[in-house]
Image (cartoon, coloured by chain):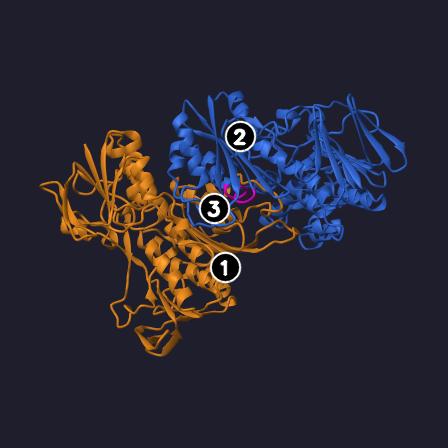
Chain colours: A blue, B orange
Amino acid sequence: MSFVITGGDAAGMSAASRAKRNKPDLDIIVLEQTSDVSYSACGMPYNIADPDREIDDLVVRHADVFRKSQKIDLRTGHRVDSIDRNKKTVSGTDLQGRQFSIPYERLLIATGASPIIPDLEGFNLPGVMALKYLSDGRRIKDYIKSQNVKKAVIVGMGYIALEMCEALRERNIEVDMVKPRQVFIPWMAEELSGVVREEIEAHSVGIHMGHRIEKITEPGSNSLEVVCSDLTLGCQMVLVATGVKPNSRLAANAALDLGPSGSIAVDRMLRTSDENIYSAGDCADAYNVITGQKTWVPLALRANRAGWAVGDNVTGKNVEIEGIVGSAVFKVFDLEVARTGLSVSEAEKAGFDPVEEVVKTRSRAHAHPGSKTLYIQIVGDRKSGRLLGMQIVGKEGAAHRIKAAAVALHQKMTVEAFSQCDFPYAPPFSPTWDPMLTAAIQLLKKL
Amino acid sequence: MSFVITGGDAAGMSAASRAKRNKPDLDIIVLEQTSDVSYSACGMPYNIADPDREIDDLVVRHADVFRKSQKIDLRTGHRVDSIDRNKKTVSGTDLQGRQFSIPYERLLIATGASPIIPDLEGFNLPGVMALKYLSDGRRIKDYIKSQNVKKAVIVGMGYIALEMCEALRERNIEVDMVKPRQVFIPWMAEELSGVVREEIEAHSVGIHMGHRIEKITEPGSNSLEVVCSDLTLGCQMVLVATGVKPNSRLAANAALDLGPSGSIAVDRMLRTSDENIYSAGDCADAYNVITGQKTWVPLALRANRAGWAVGDNVTGKNVEIEGIVGSAVFKVFDLEVARTGLSVSEAEKAGFDPVEEVVKTRSRAHAHPGSKTLYIQIVGDRKSGRLLGMQIVGKEGAAHRIKAAAVALHQKMTVEAFSQCDFPYAPPFSPTWDPMLTAAIQLLKKL
């Protein structure tokens, strides 16, 4: 059996390693267009924050380890350009410009996602960068150093934008953030996103919303301007963080079915519409357990888990993975910002009748020193009483606490059942009633 | 309707407040033998740690607030001595030695628990104290100050003992801990309890296990000795923290059914074997959701929740509470120590076929600065594949993380289903695979 994988990041290398462990004599070829495999992409903002750390610290396992220890035929600098489903071959080009064509019995498309770069003047200037690949991280660090960057503009206000605004402030770089929409974090309850905004502004970051970006100009050397219709922001570096799109062109050209946002449609066994072709990672879709509907959420845990399941399935294990509930977390300055499940508008779109409650509580017990404010938004369904989602923002106890709500969502628990949970209590960690229980009890009154 | 409550702490005052809110014209009489109601007992070690804080900081709501704002007839200094179930009266004595007898239609016994004091010579000396009531906290603080305590011995190594050893070290008091059993924390996996022990010893606390205590002597003024068969520990103060027992004598004398450890048996509506008498709080038992069996776990959340349910039920709401899963957490120096569910031996006793796994992981992502070691023990049932319990020890991310496992236990989730949960990931908070997922995946290999 020959198993070919296009894409050597989280999903691809998880699949390769898992398949090889299950079946050591399996022929595995991994084709990766860059020279980097198996690195912590999510760690890049924190690495960029520290001028004394090398970007290569983020490499979890070097290509040679896969080759030598795991006997995986890993070919970096190999870009796959097309799939011939009839002949069962993938064709492409290597770094030297040589064409290759490789037969497969099973194929995994794990091509990931790419940053969306607006098709506007100046977005190709040298000081304008996105952050996706390890090479981007290296380039940003080098640029900050060589150009002695003192001022940056971030276009976009998503996870990466927010993490990078902290990273750049850590390096004492002035930061302005700009985007066209008027809403700061659209999926977040307003009371909570306001807290995040305050935290960012308290660190002297300029937040400019409702400004349509027209172009980026270079008025002088080491000088850029982000030009909006009614605002111009000067800087030396622009980070474009306006989201990502699935790398599904290869799949689309091979006429495989696509899912939400143009991602590659897969079933619970990670099979595409071609039974010999799997897809996993940021290029593929997933089931949302709460709605039962397809969704596209390009995040690391899903990529790893899906890759692993593909490794199992190509070696005959028939593993199904249930899906996601939509959990995410980020840190911005001193705040932990966490979500799981559906926001009110997502719940409405999915056909629920959502009711929300927002509570503001203490992170520690009555009179316990060091207590911080914790904000929790909870969403339930009026018809079924089910818990649909939760968001938590606070300086402690948000990131880990929300995992309890994620389990409840996987189990389709009602808000009432959730409110009965036996959560451990000690004064340094929470009030006697955990704030999640308080939120659930308050929501019950409305349901 | 007249509703009489004996005991004005967490369960009693929760019931009184809730009942009054549901039915403002209800006659409620609360009889409390001490002068303190509604204080954070669990906060006492942290208050004792700080000489500049008043113990009264821990009072959440003063007696007069209940009397004036909530119109609850709260009678402090009133000790109930007996219940006449035929006449439906409670009788007792007040602080002035006057007898009282009060009729009830519904009665709540919320008498709490008392420290177990060994029946040995010297345990009644002035410098020998337990920590249960607010008056104990006050007495300990006063004693440390007036006697200028520099050295203390703690008898016992349970939650309170461990929290108090930290509190006393904070005040720069030398601490020795002693107990007869050879096992440090019996319910804890050995790899994890070893970590706790190291943390305590690193803070210069002497841990002396396997020493039967014979007596406490007072060789001179401001000087005590805890005498064991093969060890004598000198000090100025002894804290007795050898556990608590339910205050169920009143119930036993009234021939109500008792449950585990002599606690008062109640059903899911908190009714005792007499339909007009409820019990809640540290004196009453509970169902363990995992085993379906009765258990006695005197902890604050259960007390509050049960009291609240009684308040609902005496006002006609028919609320059932499911039970507990056995969650607890404490902090000792820089460590968070958390548990939920069953230990291996508890699982065996309950008729399961437990299998455990212990993993040692990082608290943060690969290469993320500031990462700490996290130890997780997970227990599953070989027959059903069910998750039975989890314990986590670490310097960050233990206390809140374990709530996810508590939800899974309420839902009787399998280890496999738990391993599929969508937990949010960001480098400052965990590796891509949350350590709980890693633990579950490792355990699956054994199940």
Q: Quadrant of residue B406?
A: top left
Q: Are marks 2 and 1 in contact (CB under 8 Å)?
A: no
Rendered residue at 56%/54% (across/down): B361
Q: Main secondary structure of the magenta part?
A: loop
Mark 3 Cα shell of 10 Å, populated few (<14), some (14-19), many (≥20):
many
Residue A397 among those drawn in magenta: yes
Q: Give residue A364's mark.
A: 3
The mark nearer the N terminus, 3 or 2, is: 2
User: Mark 2 falls on what kind of element?
Assistant: loop
| CA separation in Å, label 3 and label 2 | 33 Å
Q: Residue furthest right?
A: A220
Residue B299 among those drawn in magenta: no
Asked if residue A421 can be seen in this view, the reply is: yes
Rendered residue at 39%/29% (across/down): A444
Which residue in the protein does label 1 denote?
B333
Near-viewer residue (B23 or A245): B23
| CA separation in Å, label 3 and label 1 | 16 Å
Provide the chain ID for the residue under circle 2: A
User: Mark 3 falls on what kind of element?
Assistant: loop
Residue A213 versus residue B99 in the image, above or below: above
Which residue in the protein does label 2 denote?
A288
- Mark in front: 3 vs 2: 3
From the top left corner, tell me how far across and down residue B377 is, in percent: 46, 54
Query: In the image, which residues are magenta?
Result: A395-401
Check disc 2 and give the amino acid type. Answer: Asn
